């Protein structure tokens, strides 16, 4: 079924979290355990006729060994499927019960579940909840009112909460790794440019925007084509925050090549090396004249791949000779080599080991195709030795649909989510652990990518954020250029989690992948110092960068990490 996002202002926007609680406390029998609760009900995503929601119960009374949460809908909404709960509905009344593994909730502990539902005219949030028959007011309810004064004065309540206890994730900011340049995607290399609205969605930092900080653009061999992307690049620079532009050429002009063609490889003739350097420089200066600074200019996209479209063949030695002898002619930018298909060191080692050539470049680039299988999804020691940041500048992977289908337009399609989490986001995590400084996906606007392109066969809405975009934004939006990755340790409880941590702008940011089938609840994160604020955002099969509840105590925060999810936790120090 095709699902599309709606923008009606009367609807609850994706990621908004609504706190719903009753205004009156229900009486409890004498002798019963003290009770009390609060409920976070969050609409994580919404489309025409359907929605996804996440619910977190916080137990403010005595510990319970099982729970039943009830509420009613006011606009005819219907629950269609649920997870981490047994959920039934009778008319407007909904009853959610614990399952075997999440019935126990300690005092101040939490339990979470989620569900999908349908709506017709509107989708207002419930206004009241009850836990085990007791209204959730946000305060503990006493067992019974005392009829006589107590024989002794009650103890004075503590001025601050006691320490949470041993941490499950401990951040060690004294040990630092690479500085991040950002996360990004490419424009269409041969097609039309992103629209202004597309660009703003991709680089913006607002709600339902993805926060990309690098835009990759093609450097055409034909100068009359350079104007195609000017407006979108200007928008990216002005609307985004610290956005860098990477320009990648696929080929030199045909007349300068040994095969006299733009396609099927062919080498750049050595007597045209200076012309090619001037060609790259002319592009950079043209863009500067249009108000667009090109931060990084690649010498060649995939010098080791010679397809029947724009391409050009280089060896590692030839690349070294070019940047050594001609590199200084390309001004007001930093050069990159070599964007080889699988980060083949044979295309970059010669430049790194030559002093002049090395001093003429700023970055090492490579693509992810086959890199993991070849054993190069790891730190590149020679690049680190010479302080050259490594950028992963392209990967395109979309096998979930087999021969093709409209699954990409379904925001909760399981195959799409599994591929996004287990393949795409896993490799982002491993790239960060490999000390790489940037991760750049292929086209940002495509049916399998970050925003839809509107192709009817695949069911996406042009310009609308897709599941893969929300997942990628868990890094891009919160790990900003200039942040530095820092060390951390994990407890056995946190062992299923794949975690990296970053520090910058007075914040510590953690990105957490939970690719297991079990939630890790009440995970305690220890920061190096006291935290003034903690934010938690989560993307899963049924949530899109949805805000999640957190509790903060000094330098610790406690969160629930949902099964099969990617989370970002941002500490403001």
Image: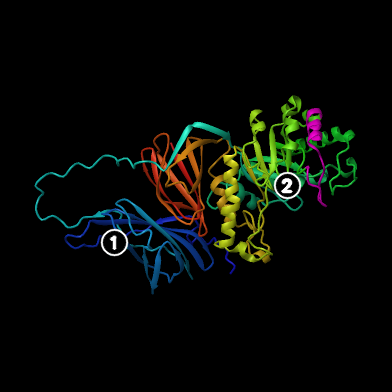
Query: Does 100 appear above or below 345?
Result: below
Q: Quadrant of the N terminus?
A: bottom right
In this image, 9 relative to 95: left or right? right
Of residues 91 and 492, the one nearer the viewer is 492
Which-is-in-front pick, marks 2 and 1?
1
Query: In the rendered view of the protein, which quadrant contains the C terminus?
Result: top left
Residue stretch rendered in magenta on the structure: 303-325
Q: Which mark is residue 229?
A: 2
Decide: few, some or many residues near mark 2? Use Cα within 10 Å; few <14, some 14-19, many ≥20. Answer: many
Name which residue lies at 34% across and 41% down. Answer: 165
Judging by the rendered image, the residue that carries numbered circle 1 is: 135
532 lies left or right of 265 = left
Residue 414 visible, this angle: yes
Q: Is residue 312 magenta?
A: yes
Against 428, residue 321 (above or below) is above
Query: Which residue is drawn at the image coordinates 49% and 64% (left, top)?
Result: 51
Q: Position of residue 520 (x, y in %)?
A: 43, 51
- In-image side of 9 versus 304 (left or right): left
Residue 338 picture location, percent across and down: 74, 38
Mark 2 element type: helix
Residue at figure coordinates x 26%, y 39% from the top left? 159
Name the N-terminal-most of marks 2 and 1.
1
**What kind of element bears circle 1?**
strand
Query: Count the marks: how many?
Result: 2
């Amino acid at each position: 079924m095709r699902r599309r996002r709606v923008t009606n202002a009367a609807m609850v926007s994706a990621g908004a979290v609504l706190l719903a609680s009753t205004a009156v406390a229900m009486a409890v029998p004498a002798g019963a355990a003290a009770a009390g609760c609060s409920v976070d009900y969050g609409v994580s995503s919404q489309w025409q006729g359907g929605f996804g929601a996440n619910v977190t119960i916080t137990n403010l009374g005595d510990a319970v060994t099982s729970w039943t949460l009830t509420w009613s809908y006011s606009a005819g909404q219907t629950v269609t499927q649920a997870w981490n709960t047994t959920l039934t509905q009778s008319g407007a009344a909904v009853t959610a019960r614990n399952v075997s593994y999440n019935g126990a909730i300690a005092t101040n502990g939490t339990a979470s579940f989620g569900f999908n539902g349908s709506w017709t005219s509107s989708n207002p949030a419930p206004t009241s909840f009850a836990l085990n028959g007791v209204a959730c007011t946000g305060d503990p309810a006493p067992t019974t009112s005392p009829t006589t004064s107590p024989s002794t004065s009650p103890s004075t309540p503590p001025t601050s909460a006691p320490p949470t206890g041993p941490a499950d994730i401990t951040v060690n900011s004294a040990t630092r790794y690479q500085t991040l340049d950002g996360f990004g995607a490419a424009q269409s290399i041969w097609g039309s440019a992103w629209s202004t609205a597309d660009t703003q969605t991709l680089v913006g930092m607002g709600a339902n925007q993805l926060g990309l900080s690098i835009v990759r653009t093609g450097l055409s061999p034909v100068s009359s084509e350079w104007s195609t992307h000017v407006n979108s690049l200007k928008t990216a620079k002005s609307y985004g925050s610290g956005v860098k532009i990477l320009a990648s050429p696929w080929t030199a002009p045909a007349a300068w090549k040994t095969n006299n063609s733009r396609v099927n490889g062919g080498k750049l003739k050595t007597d045209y090396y200076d012309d090619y350097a001037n060609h790259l420089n002319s592009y950079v200066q043209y863009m500067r004249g249009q108000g667009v600074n090109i931060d990084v200019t690649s010498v060649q996209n995939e010098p080791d791949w010679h397809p029947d479209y724009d391409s050009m063949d280089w060896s590692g030695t030839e690349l070294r000779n070019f940047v050594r002898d001609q590199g200084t002619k390309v001004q007001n930018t930093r050069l990159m080599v070599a964007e080889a298909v699988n980060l083949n060191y044979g295309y970059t080692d010669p430049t790194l080991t030559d002093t002049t050539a090395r001093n003429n470049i700023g970055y090492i680039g490579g693509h992810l195709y086959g890199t993991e299988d070849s054993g190069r999804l790891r730190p590149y020691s020679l690049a680190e030795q010479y302080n050259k940041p490594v950028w992963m500048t392209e990967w395109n992977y979309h096998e979930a649909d087999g021969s093709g289908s409209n699954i990409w337009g379904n925001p909760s399609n399981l195959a799409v989510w599994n591929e996004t989490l287990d393949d795409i986001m896993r490799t982002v995590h491993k790239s960060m652990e490999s000390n790489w400084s940037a991760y750049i996906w292929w086209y940002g606007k495509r049916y399998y990518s970050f925003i839809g392109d509107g192709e009817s066969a695949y069911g996406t809405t042009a310009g609308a954020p897709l599941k893969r975009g929300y997942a990628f934004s868990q890094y891009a939006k919160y790990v900003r250029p200039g942040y530095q990755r820092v060390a951390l340790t994990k407890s056995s409880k946190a062992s299923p989690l794949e975690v990296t941590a970053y520090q910058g702008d007075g914040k510590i940011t953690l990105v957490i992948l939970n690719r297991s089938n079990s939630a890790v609840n009440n995970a305690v994160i220890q920061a190096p110092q006291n935290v003034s604020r903690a934010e938690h955002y989560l993307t899963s099969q049924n949530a899109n960068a949805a805000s999640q509840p957190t509790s903060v105590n000094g330098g610790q925060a406690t969160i629930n990490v949902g099964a099969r999810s990617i989370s970002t936790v941002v500490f403001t120090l």
